[in-house]
Amino acid sequence: MTAYSPEVIDVNLWGPGDQAVRNARGRWSVADAAAAPFQLTIADGAYRVPPGSLHRVAIWRGEKGSLLSPAVGVGVTRDTLTAGPDGTLTIRDQAEALRLTLTPVEAQPEPPVASEE
């Protein structure tokens, strides 16, 4: 996990492989990672997940031994997720490697109700 705060969750995930390797810049990768299913469940904590809240997710998929450093819009899937009634988000995917960022969608103020006079 590279970031966990009220503003963002940023995590790298790899399928099973040889070993985790850290390069000179401090980035991790897994040599010969195999494709595997991923399931990540986020519950309410420092990163808030109230029931029904909206969250933007961005997922970058990589290949064996790749470093998951997002380039602008390259290989990224973006979506908006809604938290369940229990205040959790569950994300499922399958890849050799992926990087996932999650950010809250700011609540929009309710539009004023027009009064009939």
Image (tube, rainbow, N blue to C red):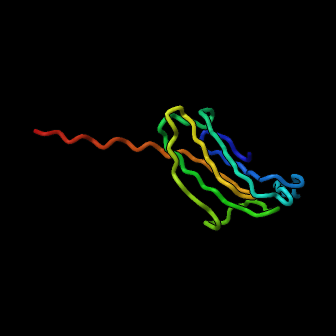
Displayed quadrant of residue 77: bottom right
Frontmost residue, 17 versus 20: 17
For image coordinates 51% across by 34% down, the residue present is: 50
Rendered view: 84 above or below 15: above
Frontmost residue, 27 versus 20: 20
Q: How many marks?
A: 0
The C terminus appears in which quarter of the rendering?
top left
For image coordinates 73% across by 47% down, the residue present is: 2
Give the image location of residue 91, x and y in percent. Answer: 61, 47
Give the image location of residue 27, x and y in percent. Answer: 81, 55
Rendered view: 73 above or below 109: below
Rendered view: 35 above or below 103: below
Frontmost residue, 44 versus 91: 91
Give the image location of residue 55, x and y in percent. Answer: 53, 46
Q: Indicate left or right for 80 with 7 as reference.
A: left
For image coordinates 58% across by 51% down, the residue present is: 57
- Identity of the residue furthest to the left in this view: 117
Rendered view: 104 above or below 97: above
Q: Indicate left or right for 41 with 24 as reference.
A: left
Give the image location of residue 42, x and y in percent. Answer: 62, 39
The N terminus appears in which quarter of the rendering?
top right
For image coordinates 63% across by 66% down, the residue present is: 72
